Amino acid sequence: MPKLKDFIGWDTFRTAMVASVVAMLVWVWAEGESVSRERIPLRITLDSNPASDYIYDAEDPAWSGTVIIEVEGTPSAIAEARELPRTELTLRFGLEGMPREAGIAKVAQLSKAIPDLPELRKLNIVVVAVDPPVVPVEVHRMVQREIPVKVELARSLLLDGEASASPSSVTIRLPDTLASRLTEGVQPIAFVSAEELDRVRGDVARTVSASVRLPASIGPVDPRLVDIRPDSVSVSIRIRREVDNFKLPPIPVWFSLPPTEDAGQWTVDILDKFVNDVIVTGPADQVSRIRSGEATIKALVELASDDLIKAIQPDRARTAAGDSASGAVTPGQTPPASGTVSRTVIFLGLPPGVSASAANPIVRVRITRQVRTTPAESGRP
């Protein structure tokens, strides 16, 4: 059976086929590039970053930030535009239609600002309409100030010197209308809470944390409009303690022996049984504990092994010499020996920060070594 190319020729047939393929490709491309229209919801926020030169605040507190844009474009471009609702878009100063003057009752023209967003300009679409087309806003012009801070405590304390903050100044970004209220003498407050003050003990310098805030004297402040850096500082505090003193009644003297000594071998007799005229000095609250009897002070003589030996050596030498001369030394028996030493007492039970002194803290102690007997002397066979 004869074919079509046999009647029209091979060249003519090939040309017709190429033309058909090109026509089909043009039709497919035209279908893919046909213009369509679609309404897409967007989530819009107004720039409220204090680091910006201008920030915006919707005057209607009920404004949710949701807008509907109607766009035209190719199916592929529309498909890309459908991804926009996943991103929160921010309207900033400098976009077309955004107010450029500070003040209230300004109008942000969304119909101009939204098409000017970089996220939309990179798409091959045309924004036909925006609903709503405008939104009333208040525009704040932001300024920056570096101001020394003033330390304020949650409760009154008697301080030794002034509390000092580190760093001593902070950097604040805030609307120019608020900055005008920071006149001379009106400073940011480094506030030390009661919990932080509870950490301060004794009369040494302590470092606590303080949060920085604007003073109440400038009036109500929307915290979203203020950026303070750093927002916390370290504060050095030294509490001045009220000093008191108190004279104690005579204090009985105690003694202690080393744990290595056999207490049964020694007899210790405190000759000066009391220490008189003892005065305690320190913080008033701690001294009051002694005055009330809550804290009991003791005077103690600590005897070392050397003290025991030195006390009996002179007497023991004399006893041994006398017995040897008279021939009265009993074989197997150690003659008794005793002596006296003078030692300075130490005071125990003193509350923190309290010291004690006495007109005469030295007491005399008689030390006697017990006589040891042989088995024959004790009646044992």
Image: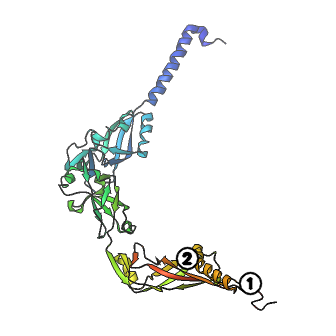
Task: Tell me the crowding category of disc 2: few under 14, some 14 to 19, or many 20 or more residues within 10 angstroms, Cα based.
Answer: some
Badge 1 marks a residue whose secondary structure is loop
* Residue at the extreme bottom: 379
Q: Is residue 348 above or below residue 63?
A: below
Task: Tell me the crowding category of disc 1: few under 14, some 14 to 19, or many 20 or more residues within 10 angstroms, Cα based.
Answer: few
Q: Is residue 117 visible?
A: yes
Q: Residue at x 28, y 62 (%)?
A: 162
Name the residue beneath numbered marker 1: 331
Query: Which of the two residues, 306 or 60, is positioned nearer the viewer here?
Result: 306
Q: Residue at x 75, y 85 (%)?
A: 374
Q: Is residue 78 above or below residue 170?
A: above
Query: Which of the two residues, 17 or 322, is positioned nearer the viewer here?
Result: 322
* Residue at the extreme right: 381
Is residue 212 shown left or right of residue 325?
A: left
Name the residue beneath numbered marker 2: 303
- Give the residue type at disc 1: Pro
Badge 2 marks a residue whose secondary structure is loop
Task: Indicate which disc residue 357 carries.
Answer: none
Q: Residue at x 27, y 51 (%)?
A: 57
Q: Position of residue 208 (x, y in %)?
A: 37, 61
Q: Residue at x 47, y 25 (%)?
A: 27
Q: Position of residue 379 (x, y in %)?
A: 77, 92
